[in-house]
Image: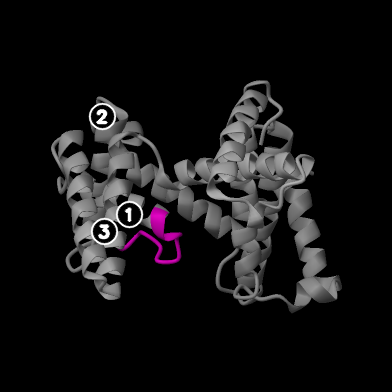
Amino acid sequence: MTGMQHLKSVVTRLRKDCPWDAAQTADSMRPYLLEECHETLEAIAEGSPTHVREELGDLLFQILLISEMYAEQGLFDLNDVAQGIADKMIRRHPHVYADRPPEPNAKSTIAQWEKDKSRERGHGGSVLDGVPKSLPALLRAHRVGEKVAHMGFDWPNIDGVRAKVDEELAELDEALRGQDRSAIAHEYGDVLLALSSLGRFLDLGPEQSLQDANRRFEGRFRVLEGLARSQGIAIEEADDSTLNTLWEAAKVIHTNASSTGQGE
């Protein structure tokens, strides 16, 4: 018995004999599926193959369990899921499986991919239909930008998008001067959208970049807290000069620790 067959038998038995698993529905599994996706992403970022393997297993279990639920209703089973995605990948890669000449590079391959998907959607569909609305907003902005760029709706070079960031920042400054809360929220959103496009031109995912920045900030602030405790300083009572001194020291310590593999 293969590992996949064994896992499938485990899922089937759990649905039959475990009260918790038997009580679940596809809808109730949504938060667990999302959690396992995030844990898998964290494991990949961590860089530990063992941890990645473990988290992929957790994610695979969710997929098999949800597939089993639909199989119980006679709608589809895991084999249908596998066959469907295999057929789609073959259809979407005619340069591999059919007679179409190979694309010269990854960028043109993705552009052709989008054109093929557009033909499959037919009239009345949108290139944006495949971007889940439930994605985190920054990641969704990045994916929407990629989708429309593949259709030719984009700046010709990074200079244009960089100028757009400056334009949106200037409009935010104007809204701040006007103290109009609605206008401020509008322009702040436009700044974030422009920055997501800048990340695309830099070949940097804004979601991952912000996650990395969050980790750096958290690591440095934890060091700052330690420095404050060691010096008997109450952070909430410290003046700006003291906090700035602590912060600069924390940045140096955290950077040095990170360079030796001891940081966050």
* Vertical comparison of 66 with 238: above or below: below
Q: Is residue 149 left or right of residue 36?
A: left
- The three-letter amino acid code for the residue at tag 3 is Asp
Residue occupying image coordinates x 66% and y 36%: 264
- How many marks the image carries: the answer is 3
Extent of the magenta region = 127-138
Query: How many angstroms separate mark 2 from mark 1 (CA)?
Result: 33 Å
Q: Which residue is mark 3?
A: 190
Q: Which residue is mark 2?
A: 103
Q: Is residue 45 left or right of residue 203?
A: right
Q: Nearer the viewer, residue 217 or 17?
A: 217
Q: How dense is the environment of label 1, judged by Cα within 10 Å: few (below 14), some, or many (20 and up)?
A: some
Majority secondary structure of magenta residues? loop
- The three-letter amino acid code for the residue at tag 2 is Glu
* Vertical comparison of 137 with 107: above or below: below
Residue with the most extreme top position: 260
Where on the picture, by quarter, is residue 128?
A: bottom left
